[in-house]
Image (cartoon, rainbow, N blue to C red):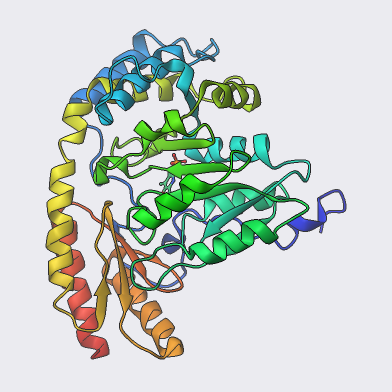
């Protein structure tokens, strides 16, 4: 251990990007990468050409990027209003902050709320792991509660108890995903009712990374809830995971704080240009959503044929698949071997402690997933 490093970082396990692609075992060379919930579609060639033109003709690489993101924030505000059927003046650039992926915004939110021992965070597992990981890197405490096994609803009683009992520091932020990853469900009515009761000194972060697939948003409620912030990203439906652009929608006072905390030139000019181009061409880019939703239904129906698999409904571009088995030891082994079999035959999916998360890919990829899963199921004679 390096003696100048904070002692709490010694035991720290970092986020593993593409956890399934690093392995010494022999695997198929060309993977169907269905483990990180990206869009299976690259940008269409005509948009790549436009972007290349912008890079060649407009972007001066010797100049710093637009550090205020004004043009992009205007375009985002317009899209946000449209996405919730709100009047075009409802949200403006003053309600938007842009980050180098939503990950950066999550970190900025933690810096702005919990540092200096002023707060801990609350998450309900399983959920997006970055909230806890980023909090730990900042020495911020993470309180976890569980979920209902059937509908994945947060254990509200436990969450409420955690809020009453956690002191020095108290819980300052509650992170929820709408729809949740990996369980793919939207916030339930009871969860929403509970979130509405949280006092103003607790920030509620609602991560709508998968909004375009669910078409269910809470932005219209932001006006009544000054302690709510909504996060979204260009990494999923907008096909820009490589370029790292996320944004948040909030009350202008909260935005002003985030703008103070962020690094001055947090987004490269190329990423800013790409996000703007994606928004200008949103009809074209988002036209693939219906296809993904149809494929999602097809996969759910096909997986429902296996009595040992338990496939949850999904409001996102991925499925959460569990095993109907009571013994947790054999369940874990079976999950691991299913994951391994899929990987050896060329499909990467995400292995979690209670299930597999499978991203909806192209029609061809999904058909291969079904074939490979069928073979794996026959091998293991479930
Ligand atoms: C994929 C994902 C994001 C996106 O993060 P970026 O840093 O914008 O790529 C955010 N939240 C959740 C829950 C996600 O699954």
Depth check: 63 or 145 in front? 145
| The residue positioned farthest toward the right in the image shown | 3
Depth check: 178 or 362 in front? 178
Residue 206 visible (yes or no): yes
- Ligand 1 visible in quadrant: top left
Residue 30 visible (yes or no): no
Residue 272 image offset from top left, x and y in percent: 42, 21
Q: Is residue 265 above or below residue 195?
A: above
Residue 64 image offset from top left, x and y in percent: 55, 13
Which image quadrant for residue 90?
top left
Residue 250 image offset from top left, x and y in percent: 48, 28
Depth check: 343 or 325 in front? 325
Residue 53 image offset from top left, x and y in percent: 30, 14
Identify which residue is drawn at 52% across, 21% down: 252
Which image quadrant for residue 212?
top left
Work out which quarter of the rendered image holds the N terminus and state it. Answer: bottom right
Total numbered circles: 0
Q: Is residue 68 above or below residue 182?
A: above
Identify which residue is drawn at 25% across, 38% down: 42
Work out which quarter of the rendered image holds the C terminus and state it. Answer: bottom left
Position of 374 with respect to 176 (left or right) is left
Position of 283 with respect to 237 (left or right) is left
Identify which residue is drawn at 44% across, 36% down: 230
């Amino acid at each position: 251990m390096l003696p100048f490093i904070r002692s709490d970082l010694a035991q720290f396990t970092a986020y593993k990007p593409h956890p399934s692609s690093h392995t010494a075992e022999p695997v198929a060379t060309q993977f169907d990468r269905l483990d990180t919930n990206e869009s299976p579609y690259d940008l269409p060639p005509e948009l790549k050409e436009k972007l290349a033109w912008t890079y060649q003709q407009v972007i001066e690489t010797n100049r710093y990027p637009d550090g205020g993101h004004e043009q992009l924030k205007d375009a985002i505000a317009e899209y946000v209003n449209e996405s919730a059927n709100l009047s075009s003046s409802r949200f403006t650039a003053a309600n938007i902050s842009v980050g180098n992926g939503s990950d950066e915004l999550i970190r900025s939110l933690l810096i702005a709320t919990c540092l200096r021992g002023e707060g801990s965070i609350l998450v309900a597992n399983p959920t997006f792991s970055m909230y806890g990981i980023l909090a730990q890197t900042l020495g911020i405490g993470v309180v976890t509660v569980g979920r209902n096994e059937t509908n994945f609803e947060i254990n509200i009683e436990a969450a409420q108890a955690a809020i009453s009992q956690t002191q020095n520091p108290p819980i300052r932020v509650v992170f929820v995903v709408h729809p949740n990853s990996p369980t793919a469900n939207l916030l339930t009515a009871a969860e929403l009712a509970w979130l509405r009761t949280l006092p103003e000194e607790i920030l509620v972060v609602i991560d709508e990374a998968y909004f375009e697939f669910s078409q269910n948003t809470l932005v219209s409620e932001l006006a009544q809830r000054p302690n709510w912030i909504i996060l979204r990203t260009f990494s999923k439906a907008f096909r820009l995971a490589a370029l790292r652009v996320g944004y948040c929608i909030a009350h202008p006072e909260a935005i002003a704080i985030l703008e103070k905390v962020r690094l001055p030139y947090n987004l490269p000019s190329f990423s800013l240009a790409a996000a703007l181009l994606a928004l200008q061409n949103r009809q074209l880019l988002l036209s693939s959503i219906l296809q993904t939703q149809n494929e999602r239904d097809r996969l759910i129906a096909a997986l429902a044929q296996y009595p040992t698999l338990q496939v949850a409904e999904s409001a996102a571009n991925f499925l959460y698949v569990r095993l109907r088995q009571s013994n947790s030891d054999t369940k874990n082994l079976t999950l691991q071997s299913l994951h391994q079999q899929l990987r050896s035959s060329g499909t990467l999916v995400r292995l979690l402690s209670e299930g597999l998360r499978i991203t909806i890919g192209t029609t061809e990829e999904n058909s291969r997933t079904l074939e490979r899963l069928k073979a794996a199921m026959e091998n293991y004679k479930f």
